Image (cartoon, rainbow, N blue to C red):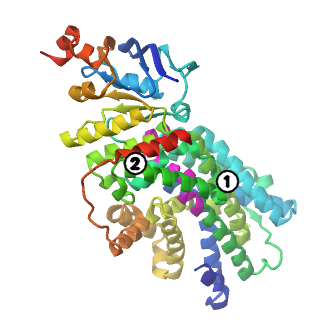
Amino acid sequence: MTALLAERVSKRFGGLTALDAVSLTVEPGEVHGLIGPNGSGKTTLLNLLSGFYQVDEGSVRLDAEDLSGAAVQRRARLGIARTFQKPRLLGSQTVLENAMLGGWRDRSAGLLSTALSLPRVRREQRMLRDRAAELLAGLGLGHALNRRANLLEHAEQRFLEIARALALRPRFILLDEPAGGLTGAEIERLGAVIRTLRDGGIGVLLVEHHTEFVFGISDRVTTLNLGRLLRHGTPQEVRNDPEVIRVYLGA
Amino acid sequence: MLGLLATLPWWAGDQYQIHLAALIAVYWILVAGLNLVVGFTGQLSIGHVGLLAIGAYAFAILAGRYEWSPWIALLASGSIGGVCGLLLGLPSLRLPGFYFAMATMAFALIVAEITLALGDLTGGGVGLAVPGFSAPFDSPAGFYLLLLGIAALITWFTWNVARFPWGRALVAIRDNPVAAESVGVPVFRMKLAVFVLSGITAGVAGALFASLQSYITPDTFVFELGLFFFVCIIIGGRSSIVGPLVGTAVLTALPELVAPLAKLGNLFYGVLLLAVVLLVPEGIGRLFEVLLARLRPERAASHVLEPDTERLAAAIRKGRDA
């Protein structure tokens, strides 16, 4: 089984060390929670894994394959998908089109065959459309396929981002605060979705502020503080760790 | 629609109207390609008149001085336009929006100076006579039909690009490049590919334009012409093909057909652009869309977001097995 690993990764912005020799492993079929106070480096770590930032020290690997220095696109093609803290959708495009974009790596037709509308182009479009529609139906967005994405409510936008990430057929999905702005009931549904991803064999990295949600759903939890690893373990271990309680959870 | 346009030579009032229709077709061949760059990918090129001039001079020199077959010269003009698009796009497409626009403007100004300076090749300020095509395309009506055919073909190409996944990703690059990257879209490579395509259509349009005018000088390719192409697309609307097509036809024909507007010249374009940007910033293409949407109102859907996890699990399994 292939795991996604960050090994003693460091990242500096100017004089500020955002991450200092942090290691983390996401296994397939597990939910790995990543928590910590604001500015502790959670999103930085996610960006190092997805390739939006490059490591200054340490390495990012997909099992034996070294991904340090690999572009975002290459990591996406290898099956690493992500969502964003603030949903990044194509507002002027439909829900279906937004989700179809996620299937990019499975089409091969370029500009020339597209301009000529070769049979392969139509076949690939059908394949992406069917896949996106299935995923959207599964996520509860089946009724809104042809709606412009900027007309969606906030929770729908979050779920649409997950649909786009899933259309990539990811081995790993990195969720950046997916519960942000959701109501209690919506967070429960998000939980059901995340469990379904995990049970489907996808490795989930869950960056989240909502600690109860993280402890309830994660198989393992990593806590960061000021760019350093604070504690790593099962939800139970992390939750009861005196140091974690002191700097983050509070009494 | 195409059939109606094809019969134009038989019901047009005079030769001048055929010439005007031919001019619209030529402009559209360029604008159709440029539309993928500006309207779909969001790269604001205002200097495509430079590529038009290169295509025009290439054709005039190859078919005129060197007496190549006009057909071969036409293909050569398109290729040269594509190569120049590549050379312009490689360094400039990485620049942020405003600087990219400036780079294309500088390119157009440089081309204008070069056509003036290389007098031995281009005839300098005196210009060059441009040969026409062979029968049956040597009459105004015949040439018009040729232009219409090429314009229709290129419209079909861009329509395909606009509706299939490769081209949908162009819109993603325009609206949210970070999201596009996150699913693996090679942003720069695609910008470059579509820019080269627009160079080819500009080169082809240049050759046909030169042949239509039958005489070209550096003054034929004033910088305002580049702005004109750009404005046709902005007025027509983003992510639309019909919009810019209508924009090109109206902006080309109106000042010619309505004499008082011609006197206003650039003022007419200026006022029209201002009106569109202020009143319908998304262009007339969007106006069509909104009207169409009014005709078939969407049902008010329930707002309960209820995932169907079994169905989701099945979809994920299918993805793993694929």
Instruction: Give left or right: position of B227 versus A82.
Output: right
Residue B258 x/y as whole percent: 48, 81
The part of the chain drawn in magenta is B159-181
Give how far apart the Cα atoms at labels 2 and 1 are.
36 Å
Disc 1 on helix, strand or loop? helix
On the image, numbered disc 2 is attached to which residue?
B311
Q: Is residue B299 visible?
A: yes
Q: Which residue is drawn at 57% across and 18% down?
A: A64
| 2 vs 1, front mark | 2
Disc 2 on helix, strand or loop? helix
Residue B230 x/y as whole percent: 51, 59
State the quadrant of the C terminus of chain A. top left
The quarter holding residue B129 reads bottom right
How packed is label 1: few (under 14 Cα within 10 Å), some, or many (20 or more)? Answer: some
The quarter holding residue B91 reads top right
Amino acid type at image mark 2: Arg
